Image (spheres, rainbow, N blue to C red):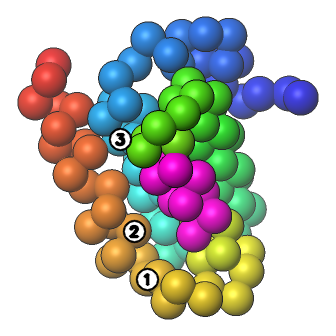
Amino acid sequence: MTYRHRALAAGRWRAFAFVEQMANVGGEVERMLNWRARQQPAHAEQAFERALELLDLTLVAARSGPRLKEVARVREALVDYWAGANGSASTDASWRRYFLPFAYAARRTR
């Protein structure tokens, strides 16, 4: 598999705290939503793929426990929202509300 975030995939991702990992995923989701709003579907799709890659790295780093379950559900919901039928009725605003606390928490820990 070819990673866009090669340094993170090589092990650096595990050094980040969970809130930092999720804040980074949220950054990619924010870019995805912004590119779609600017009617740039190719850029939006690339941001979506990067978000999935970071979620996959987070799943590997979580290994077990409640974090694993949460990240797996987030990944499933994001794929359903972006490429599926959006069965959970997600919106751009709901994704921003989900990831914003992670950004705040990651910023406070710096």
Q: Which mark is residue 23?
A: 3
Residue carrying label 1: 91
Q: Residue at x 47, y 38 (%)?
A: 65
Q: Which quarter of the rendered picture does the N terminus lie within? A: top right
Q: Which quarter of the rendered picture does the C terminus lie within? A: top left
Q: Residues within 10 Å of mark 3 (few under 14, many from 20)?
A: many
Q: Relative to residue 55, is residue 70 depicted above or below? A: below
How far apart are the alpha carbons under marks 3 and 2?
12 Å
Name the kind of residue labelled 2 in the image: Trp
Give whichever of 70, 31 is nearer the camera.
Answer: 70
Q: Secondary structure at mark 1?
A: loop
Residue 40, image x, y percentages: 64, 68
Name the kind of residue labelled 1 in the image: Thr
Q: Secondary structure at mark 3?
A: helix
Badge 1 or badge 3: first in the primary sequence: 3
Name the kind of residue labelled 3 in the image: Ala
Query: Residue 73 vs residue 15: left or right?
Result: right
